[in-house]
Amino acid sequence: MYQTLLSIFIPPLAICRYGAAACCIYPISGIWLGGLALFAYYFLTSHHINALTELGSLYGGVALVLIAIVWTRLTLKQVETEGMRTTTGGNRICSRLVPNPQEPDPLEEVAKTREGR
């Protein structure tokens, strides 16, 4: 359930956590961010322009986000069936999205310093 929700709302993070990040993270991220940019354009500026630009940015944003979601779901299903999950080592996007378990938690460090006063 969590994997499905994550792949619908944040496809790059779903690929980093559950999929083969080495092969699909960059194109899925680009398509998804392009769709979000078209949504932002539609909601922020396109109402002052002609109807073709307004509807084109809305439909284009929907199409790009749907492509990213379908691509993510297909990749995750293939990873589950073939067991080809790869590690996220060396991938810039995944290293920023998925925290490193060896890194200390900043909130725990703040709590320790407050207790030490």
Image: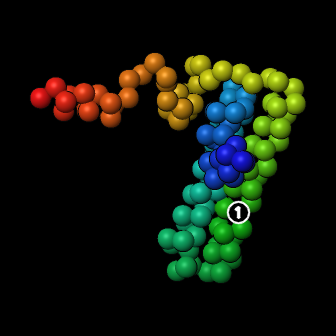
Residue shown at the point (65%, 67%) measured from the top left: 57
> Residue placed at 82% from the left, 42% from the top?
74
- Residue 73 sits in quarter: top right
**Secondary structure beneath disc 1?**
helix
**Residue 39 percent location from the top left of the image:** 59, 64
Q: Residue furthest left?
A: 117
Up/down of 62 relative to 34, above or below: below
Residue 68 visible somewhere in the drawing: no
Vertical position of residue 116 compared to residue 5: above or below? above
| Residue ID at (72%, 48%) | 1
Quarter the C terminus occupies: top left
When asked about the image quadrant of residue 40, the answer is bottom right
Q: Position of residue 12 (x, y in %)?
A: 63, 41
Of 12 and 1, nearer the camera is: 1
Which residue sits at x=62%, y=48%?
10
Q: Which one is in front, 69 or 43?
A: 69
